[in-house]
Image: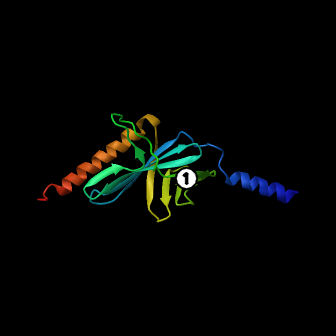
Amino acid sequence: MKKLFFIFILFLSQNSLTGELDGKKIICEHFKEKGYFSVVGFKFVENKVYKNRIASYGSYADITGIHRKPNNPVPEIGDYEESYKYYTSDKEVSWNFREFTLNRETLVLKERNKRSHQCKIVDSDNYYRILNEYLDKLIKEIKKRMKNNKL
């Protein structure tokens, strides 16, 4: 009986409380030399985490994982937005089969590929505004790199 009780307690400690992080939003930065940067945002909604990434495609940049309606500056969750169930412990949050692991104390996000990002919690009202500021910064950087192009 003691073994069964121990296994039950261990199981409870490893699983997230339902919706424990719902409503939280974080933005994570990874900066490198020469103006290159990587920014990714995560939204915790209904026991899932949704990913938005600032991405550049050659001379074009955008925020992935959003659906924009005409004349609406606030994007909505897109049909193609990546989402994964998240799991919490007392020290970390993980999702996508531990592809991402977030330290709950330091807010350092580690990817399985060993890249790490420093994250910050942001207000829901500021989430897309901050992502758009990073997008504008990336677009300016792309234009700066292309300013001497003849074609």
Quarter of the picture containing the C terminus is bottom left
Q: Is residue 15 left or right of residue 112?
A: right
Q: Is residue 21 left or right of residue 147?
A: right
Percent coordinates x, y for residue 118 in the rendering: 44, 52
Residue at 49% x, 59% y: name it: 110
Quarter of the picture containing the N terminus is bottom right
Furthest residue toward bottom: 113
Residue at 44% x, 62% y: name it: 115
At label 1, which amino acid type do we have?
Tyr
Percent coordinates x, y for residue 67 in the rendering: 41, 43
Q: Nearer the viewer, residue 18 or 123?
A: 18
Percent coordinates x, y for residue 143 in the rendering: 20, 52
Furthest residue toward right: 1
Residue at 28% x, 47% y: name it: 137
Q: Secondary structure at mark 1?
A: strand
Q: Is residue 46 left or right of residue 77?
A: right
Dividing the picture into quadrants, the one containing residue 59 is bottom left
Q: Is residue 36 left or right of residue 92?
A: left
Number of residue marks? 1
Q: Residue at label 1?
A: 84
Percent coordinates x, y for residue 55 in the rendering: 35, 54
Q: Residues within 10 Å of mark 1 (few under 14, many from 20)?
A: some
Q: Nearer the viewer, residue 4 or 51?
A: 51
Dividing the picture into quadrants, the one containing residue 97 is bottom right
